[in-house]
Amino acid sequence: MVVLALTTAAYVNLLGPVLEFLFTGRTQAVASLARFLPSSLDPGGWLAQVDRERVLAALPFVITTVALAKGLAYFGQFYLMGMVSQRVIADLRTALFDHLLGLSPSFFSKRHSGDLMSRFSADVQSVETAVSYAVSSYIRDGLTIVVMLVNCFVLDWRLSLMAFVAVPATFLPIVRIARRLKRVTQQSQSALGRISEMVQEALSGMRVVQAFGMEGWESERFREENRRWIRIMRRSFVVRALYSPLMEVMAAAGLSLAIWWVGGRILRGELEAAKFFSFVAAVLLLYSPVKQLGKVGQIALQGGAAAERIFEILDARSGVPDAGELTLPPFAREIRFEDVSFSYEEKPVLEGVSLALRKGEVVALVGSSGGGKTTLANLLPRFWDVSSGGIRIDGVDVRDARLASLRAQMAVVTQETVLFNDTVRANIAYGRPDVAMADVERAARMAFAHEFIAALSRGYETVVGEKGVLLSGGQRQRIAIARAFLKDAPILILDEATSSLDAESEREVQRALEGLMGFGAPGGPRTTLVIAHRLSTIRHADRIVVLAGGRVVEVGRHEELMDRRGEYARLYRIFEGGGDPARKVAAG
């Protein structure tokens, strides 16, 4: 960039002497160029002896050499700055993605995924444009402006003062325009985030939209948000359109003053024509990078506004800090919930819950919706942290253990099955491409999934589509169970894993879940925490814990709780369709 600025100045200093030489034919007209060459070459003495033809023959070579140096310098700065900027953006994307992966679910519960995607796409794109173009332009054109200003004052400092007298007057309006543009740009980025939210909601809920005939309503909502964005962009373009004319008028005013003042000096012979030509060329070449800085300044402001939205995410702290220093040893004895309380914001969900799960036990959590079942289960792998009390695994508080070592000992199967747009094999062996195919197939067989997988068009290499859309609900759930089989974690959490399935799919999935829990296995059952909506699926649990209002109200086996005719018996009659509970148990 330095070479680029210097060669631009060289062009300016060539122009005046060359024009004077061409018009007057005097070789001494180009003598001013001698100051740019080493004195040991004695360019002045050489010019005094050389004839016009030799000077004329040398000038094209000199001009071409300067142009070649400028071209090579521009290529180098463009390529190198381009690669640096792309690495910066790649690092920024990676940092943003890694930080999102480390944030707790409480963060995502308050953020719309469409807005987060907008920050990944539109905002990162704005930062990329700013880094790619604005930063390089600031350095390159800034250097050029400095070199050209110095060159102008070297040529004639009084003429320079006259030409640039109007420049300070532009600072105040430019600063005001910049502040206004930044504010409007932030509004624009937020509007784009809302548009992304609406698109994602409409696409993910397309069946509901079409089933209720709400296409027109959704379209009108989207149009209104677009109209709001257009109004913001109209203000943005008004502000941005003011900058270039303002700079042009100020530059013209300064140049006009210089020409008016310098005319008399030239007539009186106080200023050489060659110097004036070079000065005018310098001012004109100075105007181009100044105008370019104005344009990229707008890009930089947009990038700055987008960067603020990105750093808002990067600065967000996880509600579950990974501050533990212990590596949790393999689970051996028991899990204890000790007087656990938890609140979402100011709303209490759990109050004083105490519960123990011994190794090999299957404990079921039941209760009405909103009773705190899923919340209690989510506290074990530290998706959230307790508000008070504690959770211990073999006597170690889970907050003192590293998150990775804690979650490595747990497998989770939820009602909402998460599959990725990849092959069946990749979804079962999630994140473990080195797992042998035999192990993947064995896990699928244990989950009663091998038969339907083998019937797919490409078997285990079949791509399941976004969220597993090409598979049925029961098939997706069995692949998730196969994933848990392959992990072979000692602690298992099942969160209403069959509640959204039809009767036939539920039977298949229930068989797979019983295998996963370890019923009938040589080593005995796996330590399992089950959240059940259909109470008939947890009759064989070692203990059933009934939650109501965030508290434990009953604990016991199925038969014991049915005999008490308390909360569990009431729930059983409601969820299992009424009738004689004893007869239903016998039939089961």
Image (cartoon, rainbow, N blue to C red):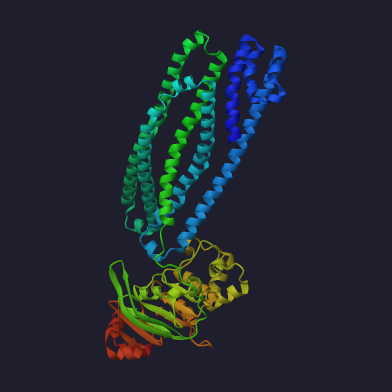
Total marks placed: 0
User: Which residue in the rendered view is the most extreme toward the front?
Assistant: 40
Which of the image's four quarters has the C terminus? Answer: bottom left
Residue nearest the viewer, comparing 52 with 353: 52
Q: Which of the 4 quarters of the picture holds residue 561?
A: bottom left
Residue nearest the viewer, comparing 288 with 413: 288
Query: Residue at point 58% right, 36% down?
Result: 1
Left or right: 569 as drawn, with respect to 506: left
Res 441 seen here:
yes
Query: Residue at point 58% right, 39% down?
Result: 78
Q: Is residue 166 above or below residue 327?
A: above
Query: Residue at point 69% right, 16% down?
Result: 47
User: Which residue in the rendered view is the most extreme toward the top?
Assistant: 268
Q: Is residue 501 above or below residue 27?
A: below
Q: Position of residue 58 (x, y in %)?
A: 70, 19
Q: Is residue 434 above or below residue 571?
A: above
Q: Which of the 4 quarters of the picture holds residue 34?
A: top right
Query: Residue at point 62% right, 9% down?
Result: 24
Left or right: 194 as drawn, with respect to 481: left
Q: Position of residue 107 (x, y in %)?
A: 39, 62
Res 504 seen here:
no
Residue nearest the viewer, comparing 59 with 555: 59
Q: Position of residue 293 (x, y in %)?
A: 47, 34
Residue nearest the viewer, comparing 278 with 356: 278
Q: Position of residue 129 (x, y in %)?
A: 49, 43
Q: Is residue 578 above or below residue 482?
A: below
